[in-house]
Image (cartoon, rainbow, N blue to C red):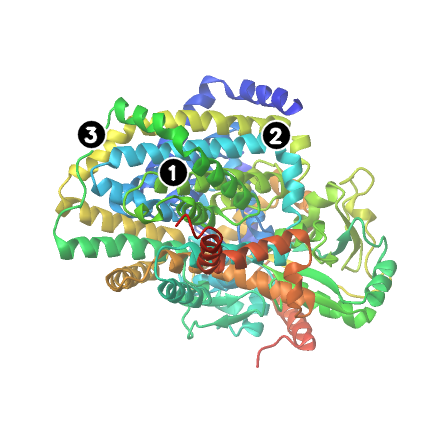
Amino acid sequence: MEAFGLLVHGFAVLLTGKTLVLMMVGLVLGVFVGVLPGLGGPNGVAILLPLTFTMDPTSAIVMLSCIYWGALFGGAITSILFNIPGEAWSVATTFDGYPMAQQGRAAEALTAAFTSSFIGSLVAVLLITFLAPMISSFALKFGPPEFFAVYLLTFCSFVGLGREAKHKTVISMSLGLLLAGVGMDTVSGQLRMTFGSAELLRGINFLVAVIGLFGISEILLTMEERLALRGHAASISLRVVLSVWKDLPKYWVTLVRSSFIGCWLGITPGGAIAASFMGYNLAKRFAKDPESFGKGRIEGVFAPETAAHASGTSALLPMLALGIPGSGTAAILLGGLMVWGLNPGPLLFVEHKDFVWGLIASMYLGNVVGLALVLTTVPIFASILRVPFAAVAPMIVVSCAIGAYAIQNAMFDIWLMLGFGVVGYVFKKIGIPLAPFTLALVLGNRAEDAFRLSMIGSAGDLRVFWSNGLVGSITTLAIVLLFWPMIERLVGRIGQLRRPVKA
Amino acid sequence: MRIPVKAVGAATALLLSAPAFAGWEPTKPVEIVVAAGAGGASDQMARMMQAAIQKNNLMKQPMVVSLKGGASGAEALMYMKSSEGDPNKVLIAYSLIYMLPLSAKIPFNWRELTPVSVIALDQFVLWDNSAGPKTVKEFVEAAKAASSPFKMGGTGSKREDHVLTVFLEQKTGAKFSYLPYKSGGEAATQLVGNHTESNVNNPSENLEVWRAGQVRPLCVFDKERISYTSKVTETQSWADVPTCKEEGVDVQYLMLRAMFLPGKVTPEQQAFYVELFQKVTQTPEYKEYMEKQALKPIFLTGKDMVKFLEEDEALNKSLMTEAGFVAK
């Protein structure tokens, strides 16, 4: 109950006219940067960070975290309307969100995305509020073997639970892992696959690849087929919003499951990206009719969005409590904290109560205000679909290029993005799924480092992955998921043998 | 306020014997390039300078922090190298300028950049978990007696932390398995979580977990103790940490923190930054930061700096060669 009292105190710190104005400004800016592919949360926060140096720490963090919430909300918009993920973790949202927009249900999909973002964040904030001390000690249990087990679980769940042909998923994932190896290898300190090029030193940025693979390739496909965006004008009304909300209780299992996955991966820091994919795959696996996923099913929007936002929000916890950022944006916020003279770490919660609880209170308020803000602006975003393709396409390409450039201020990345656009086009034509590729590209490096550090630590003994209850159960679960289709068939057959008469 | 600032400027210009100092100043935002990831020691320092410059109005143009930590910082080096003649980029460098070209054959030499000033020296401390051995002697004995080698966490491979580990092995006879993490922050958390037995982090990287009583500083790798005597934890200050030499392990290493401009900038531009960073070192923000992070104050520029860099490079090269980290 102490937490509750502190939270009330936090709200008291927050509820001043100035803070509320900053909050609105932050949210609007955040939605804006979230909509532009690649610009996204981390860049938005980084650009605006210096503006806050003259503010007091609480106002500054409230504004920055509202940019973050805004970007989280905004990322869903382009995924659904144009099949271009504004943020990396919105990739899974495109699977069902975009088909829904094509069927003229854009408003419904957007409402679903915003609502589930809200639910995911809310669950994560509740978790932060009441479990902060316990959770930071849980995160400390993660050494290299545990991290590797989590990444393995993500990869395996993708192969085992994915809807595409298994060999195509594996091909796509292997290519991603290969490209993830470009650049400096942390463990040996040597360069790999850079071929003497200074541009390749920093490796292949995941976001550049995502913008090209999804955004540019989509434009190419659309150009080939017909010069029109395959979507219909969406009319949004309070009625649509309410009808989506009315159906929410039906999906409570999906929402709870995704919130759980998100919180877990956000804290451990597996990241929002892994969380959104895992949330989607599990929702599909446990659905009665997995076939209908990918064809515009509202659950396919709920699942990844809830997980991504639960994860994005809970990623702030290890940042505050341990000083390890769980996401890119959290890393920039971390830099900000230090400028304001606050050192993240176990003592932050003790020494700077005003700040910590003001921030937590702002998470509640920011989410509520953010939801209201994006819902009222849905008609504006949905109306983009009514603009002729010939006018929108160049704007999308330009915004993709700006996004790709802004990530590392490198011209080379724009060429890379265009290259990935062609690769994405070819992949779509020959039916190779893009998601495993992007997943491997983003997690490949970390998984490799974690594996090799585990091996150094255990002197090459693979049993380290079963050396304690935590890592053992994650690893076992990963392997079960990898062979899930076979296990399922086996279980089905045993079931048939036992009840032969009923069939 | 105006006059003393100008006086300092004039004095600096005289010191540099650069009569051409004609008041050049940046006309667009200045990028401060960090050769490490977010939240690391370099990033923290860059953000401190950004805030110090902005709060004290030391420059008309804003300063932006640009993180180029890719390829263990090589990205930043190549970026600076390719920005020849651009006076709006300034690198905050550390020992990677000597080590990366040796270990990973990065085509880079600090002589291709324009040295501005050395602004601090960073310490290295041997840390263990607060549940572990209490003194260096006990630690070394425990490491020798352990059935599998003690795990030593550090940042990157074939770098400062790794070199120190090799020398620690040579001087004590204990064996360590070195785990290269991506950042000092990660190495700190892994030590707290008992996934490693020790690390050789900079003071700033372990400061918070030390204050929380989760890790213990065993000794500092320097000839003398750290000078700051105000209490950091409830009972200890940085000055209470013994040197490794006192504890019978004669290993010393200090790391530079220095500012560089790209190559081929004009002397006026160089002079502007020399003056700027000299002013930064006089701000309360800088002084507070130095004390908090237990950095050694130093300010070298011009010929002194080049002399320092040459000697430091020779030292680093010999350490790297001895440790066997120089790529063939």
How far apart marks 2 and 1 lie (CA) works out to: 25 Å
* Disc marking residue A235: 3
Q: Amino acid at mark 2?
A: Phe
Would you name the residue on which mark 1 appears?
A302
Tell me the element at label 3: loop
Q: Where residue A102 sits: x, y (%)?
A: 21, 43
- Name which quarter of the figure residue A130 lies in: top right
* Disc marking residue B33: none
Q: Is residue B281 left or right of residue A270?
A: right
Callout in the foreground (2, 1): 1
Would you name the residue on which mark 2 appears?
A130
Quick check: B83 above or below A323? Answer: below
Are there few (<14), some (14-19), or many (20+) residues within 10 Å of tag 1?
Answer: many
Identify the residue at image location x=67%, y=55%: B122
Q: Where residue A251 sits: x, y (%)?
A: 40, 34
Whether residue A500 can be seen here: yes
Given the image, what chain letter belongs to the residue carrying mark 2?
Answer: A
Determine contact: label 2, label 1, CB under 8 Å: no
How far apart marks 2 and 3 lie (CA) works out to: 40 Å
Q: Is residue B245 left or right of residue B278?
A: right
Given the image, what chain letter belongs to the residue carrying mark 1?
Answer: A
Quick check: A458 above or below A407? Answer: below
Q: Is residue A228 left or right of residue B305?
A: left
Do circles 2 and 1 both sit on a common chain? Answer: yes
Q: Amino acid at mark 3?
A: Ser
How far apart marks 1 and 3 lie (CA) works out to: 21 Å
